Image (cartoon, grey):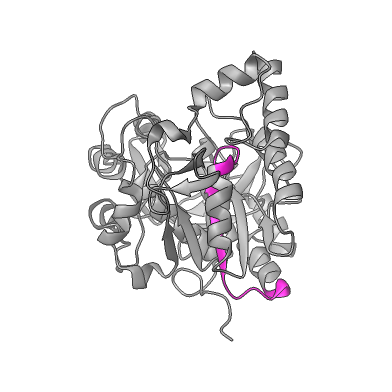
Amino acid sequence: MHGLIQPHGGELVNRLVTGAKLDALTSEAAGLTRIDMTPKQSCDLELIANGGYSPLEGFMGQADFQAVCKDMTLADGTVWAIPILLAVDSANAPKVGDRCALYAPNGVLQGVIHVEEVYPHDKKLEIPTVFRTEDDAHPGAAKVMQEGDTCIAGSVDVVTLCVDPDGPEAFMDLRLRPAQTRAAFAERGWHTAVAFQTRNPIHRAHEYICKCAQEICDGLLIHPLVGETKAGDIPADIRMDSIAVLVEKYFNHETTMVSVLPAAMRYAGPREAIHHAIMRKNYGCSHFIVGRDHAGVGNYYGTYDAQKIFDDIDLQSLGITPLMFEHAGFSKSFGGMVTRKSFGWDNKDIVFLSGTKVREMLAAGEIPPGEFTRPEVAKVLMKWAQATS
């Protein structure tokens, strides 16, 4: 029987220092030029350090940046879809050869970068290629516009992964590094695992496609994203509470794991689907679920654009297998969950609720129908909605 899938690039990166090296780096950092990172940059640094961004060992240089934007590969041809940049204000940019201390938004020292390259942040290249729009109302594009105009690149050494272990989005018991999820899969005897990405509570359609995918793999990793998201998204702690009650009652615990992904959302739709798949490959998953409008926002992307983009890359280089699912919903006439592929439907027969409609119902104390969400999940969401309305 084959072992787990190899990490992207062949080797799992670890840039977290420990022991005497940790003490020395912390002492050195006190005397270095300080760079205060954005929440997105802090999330990226954690994923570089823990191996989630393997094969990256630091923030990208110009050749990788340009290749990613233009060709969806690193400069060496390895599939990669999202630039991982450390952009700073030009007036405060360090010089090649400098070492700088990297601080998280809450002021905690997170690591040190050895500056190997300094180059212009070409936002006119990044924004339209990555986000397929230049609309400054797009949350991902807006973040890039707010970033500095100079990028610094180089390898990093990290002193702490989670900068706020007591914070509401830390989830330390579920914040497993790629090496840890891989060890957990091996301990369970899983040779194949399918990952489900979400930044929302899991409703019945999500549950359905998870269980369909679960039938063809040894196990399922429910892997919610808990890094930076946009205003209006349901808070991570509420999402995690809803996942906990769902998994407790409706999933097989022997074939289901829950961990968290400390990544920031880009809302880059198709490109981000590839990005999410690469990270899950590094976490040890052989398969990755891609549903409708994966990582989308507003009306910027077509319903299945995030599936079609996998036709534009080298799947052998990607390594992980994408599992494509049609829009799913509860059919009253069929009496269960269906997709267009499994049951030709009339939209009037399918129970669909918009996010806005669900929030309105919850705020009014109305539990959404069981065909849309499990009652245990609805109770968690209703408690939150009423407390914030």
The foreground one among 382 and 342 is 342
In this rendering, position of residue 171 left or right of residue 9: right
Which quadrant of the view contains residue 368? top right
Q: Residue 121 placed where, x, y %?
A: 30, 41
Q: Is residue 254 above or below residue 135?
A: below
Q: Residue at x 71, y 62 (%)?
A: 18
Q: Is residue 135 above or below residue 223?
A: above
Q: Is residue 51 above or below residue 333?
A: below
Q: Residue at x 51, y 35 (%)?
A: 38
Q: Residue 161 placed where, x, y %?
A: 65, 51
In this rendering, position of residue 372 left or right of residue 67: right
The foreground one among 368 and 116 is 368
Q: Quadrant of the N terminus?
A: bottom right
In this rendering, position of residue 234 left or right of residue 353: right
Q: Residue 197 placed where, x, y %?
A: 53, 49
The part of the chain drawn in magenta is 186-204
Which quadrant of the view contains residue 90? top left
Q: Quadrant of the C terminus?
A: top right
